[in-house]
Image (tube, grey):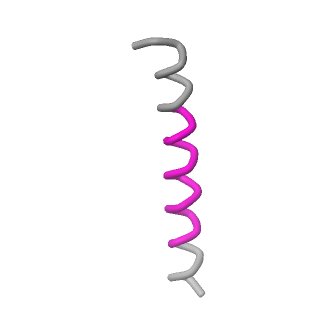
Amino acid sequence: MTRRGMFYAYLLGVVVLLVIFSVIGLVGL
């Protein structure tokens, strides 16, 4: 896996976590 591929995988992981926390927050409200 290239350095660029690792960067995009990390970026995608961060976005997924943000989406999950947003959904949990909306459900919690």
In the rendered structure, which segment of residues is drawn in magenta? 10-23
Q: Nearer the viewer, residue 29 or 9?
A: 9
Residue 4 x, y percent position in the rendering: 53, 19
Vertical comparison of 22 with 8: above or below = below
- Quadrant of res 18: bottom right
Q: Main secondary structure of the magenta part?
A: helix
Residue at 56 percent of width and 50 percent of height: 15
Q: Is residue 18 left or right of residue 13?
A: right
- Determine which quarter of the picture holds residue 7: top right
Q: Residue 19 in the image: x percent, y percent?
A: 53, 61
Percent of width and height locating residue 22:
58, 69
Residue positioned most to the top: 2
The reply to whether the magenta stretch includes residue 11 is: yes
Q: Residue at x 52, y 31 (%)?
A: 8
Question: Looking at the rendering, in which quadrant would you find the N terminus?
Answer: top left
Q: Is residue 3 magenta?
A: no
Residue furthest to the bottom: 29
Q: Residue at x 53, y 13 (%)?
A: 3
Could you tell me which quadrant the C terminus lies in?
Answer: bottom right
Residue 9 image position (x, y, % from top left)? 47, 32
How many numbered dots are placed on residues in this image? 0
**Location of residue 7 with respect to 18 vertically, above or below:** above
